Image (cartoon, coloured by chain):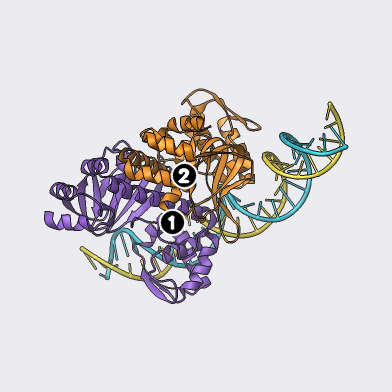
Chain colours: A orange, B purple, C cyan, D yellow
DNA sequence: CGAGGGTTTGAAGTGCATCAAATAGTGTGG
DNA sequence: CCACACTATTTGATGCACTTCAAACCCTCG
């Protein structure tokens, strides 16, 4: 199990410059979690000792207000880490993490991660780039919220899953529509209606969770008018 | 001049762990800019060689879409740096920077900054923390956009300028109301009306750019219901 | 004093949220 | 394998918040 875990960590791009002892110690200390939908991994404002590498499944990060409203910060799937942000927040988790689709996680030690950050400048640099791109991504999202309308935001979300820039393509929504809606900061009803409008405007085809884009360029010209970046806007996400 | 510049850089918290040669080289290469309102420092997507330390005045960062809409990313004043983000974006400025209130800047070398990041792990760590807090701040703003209404967002903005947590206080809006409005992602008209509502709801007093808060706690209970953080939410801004 | 930009106010429109209910889809136990 | 229960999704009707367009007002500064 440890060997497999170490394997998995070694191929995670963010860790590409980490030391051998980092991988060894991490793997020795790690444990694999089989998670099921609805499971809460940690609560925001809780003290943190572990972070998680997602091997499979989906996890959403969110925060809640006193009056029960929920703000979904992000939704992650395999080959991503979550909870590492606590290192920069006095070892307090800044968000609540809940499994939205069952899968497998690796629980990892924050202190070993921190030790590596203290001692390995190349890794610290990689992490810095990672964080900076994360921040840019957030800026982009703030821009989208104020400049794009609901159908355009959905179009942009779909475009983010395509691996080509023209012609036709088919994608599966990664998780249920209600979650996509909250990820995009809108109500499920609004999502449903907005998807309908997008269908009419761009000729996409929706069958359940499957979406067929007959002409990517039509979708681009519909969604990207209200964005300051040019498609294909390089994904500023967690990959590095 | 160089001596003064070095002085100024040395007291900037983010640079507290930088090497002596960093300060010397930076100061030798630096030049002071007297800026006037409307001046554009750099354009988004332009190649970057310099970043800027703000000694005085105000600068806004924004991006524009094809159809001319503008998204204000942030507004900065003295004791802040701007343009350093280009280091993580292939040396391309991610935003346009425009002076909105005349003042004085120090133009600094990105490559010297980068050199220090490569060689000084303590500084890289500080920068990483700085960036992580920046990202958290953005998350908070995204949350605010979706959970708070216009008057609450203004209340939250005002609270961010107070230096105490109860009783009464007086602040001056840092820049003109139209800019505050766009910083908060709303129209000037909406801002004006929302400020009116805030006045009625919380008993604040508005005289031009001066705002008197008679009871901070009233303002808190009005604004912070729709926020997942508890007042006084430690400022996650550029200070470190 | 007069010009021009910032700010406020009014009236009307739009988009999204909300509440309610119908429909489709999914998993479970019989 | 089917029927039921439960959840996800869609659709309809209505309301509210913010935007938009237009005009008045105010304030500053040459």
For the image shown, how many numbered marks are present on the structure? 2
Location of mark 2 (residue) = A109
SS at circle 1: loop
Q: Which mark is residue A234?
A: none
Closer to the camera in the image, B116 or B82: B116
Same chain, marks 2 and 1? no
Residue A174: image location, x then y, percent: 58, 34
**Residue A71: x %, y % from top left:** 55, 51
The reply to whether callout 2 and callout 1 are in contact (CB within 8 Å) is no
Q: Is residue B23 left or right of residue A193?
A: left
Which image quarter is the N terminus of chain B in?
bottom left
Q: Secondary structure at mark 2?
A: strand
Q: Which part of the image, by quadrant, shows the C terminus of chain B?
A: bottom left
Is B236 above or below relative to A216? Answer: below
Would you name the residue on which mark 1 appears? B184
Residue at left offset 48%, top offset 40%:
A29
Nearer to me, A231 or A222: A231
Q: Where is residue B92 shown, x and y percent of the image?
A: 30, 38
Q: Chain of mark 2?
A: A
Disc 1: CA contacts within 10 A as few (<14), some (14-19) or many (>=20) = many
Q: Residue at x 39, y 68 (%)?
A: B162
Placement of B186 over or under C15, stated as above or below: below
């Amino acid at each position: 199990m440890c060997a497999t875990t170490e394997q998995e960590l070694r191929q995670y791009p963010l860790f590409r410059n980490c030391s051998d002892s980092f991988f060894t110690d991490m793997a020795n200390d790690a444990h694999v979690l089989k998670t099921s939908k609805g499971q809460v991994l940690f609560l925001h404002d809780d003290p943190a000792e572990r972070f998680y590498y997602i091997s499979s499944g989906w996890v959403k990060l969110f925060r809640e207000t006193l009056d029960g409203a929920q703000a979904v910060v992000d939704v992650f799937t395999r080959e991503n880490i979550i909870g590492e942000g606590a290192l920069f927040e006095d070892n307090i988790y800044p968000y609540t993490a809940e499994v939205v689709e069952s899968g497998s996680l690796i629980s990892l030690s924050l202190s070993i991660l921190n030790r590596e950050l203290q001692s390995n400048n190349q890794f610290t640099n990689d992490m810095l780039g990672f964080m900076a791109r994360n921040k840019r991504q957030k800026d982009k999202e703030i821009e989208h919220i104020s400049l794009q309308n609901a159908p355009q935001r959905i179009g942009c979300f779909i475009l983010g899953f395509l691996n080509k820039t023209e012609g036709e393509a088919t994608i599966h929504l990664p998780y249920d529509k209600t979650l996509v809606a909250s990820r995009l900061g809108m109500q499920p009803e609004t999502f449903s209606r907005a998807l309908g409008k997008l269908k009419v405007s761009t000729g996409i085809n929706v069958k359940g969770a499957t979406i067929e884009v007959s002409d990517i360029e039509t979708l681009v010209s519909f969604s990207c008018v209200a964005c300051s970046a040019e498609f294909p806007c390089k994904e500023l996400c967690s990959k590095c």
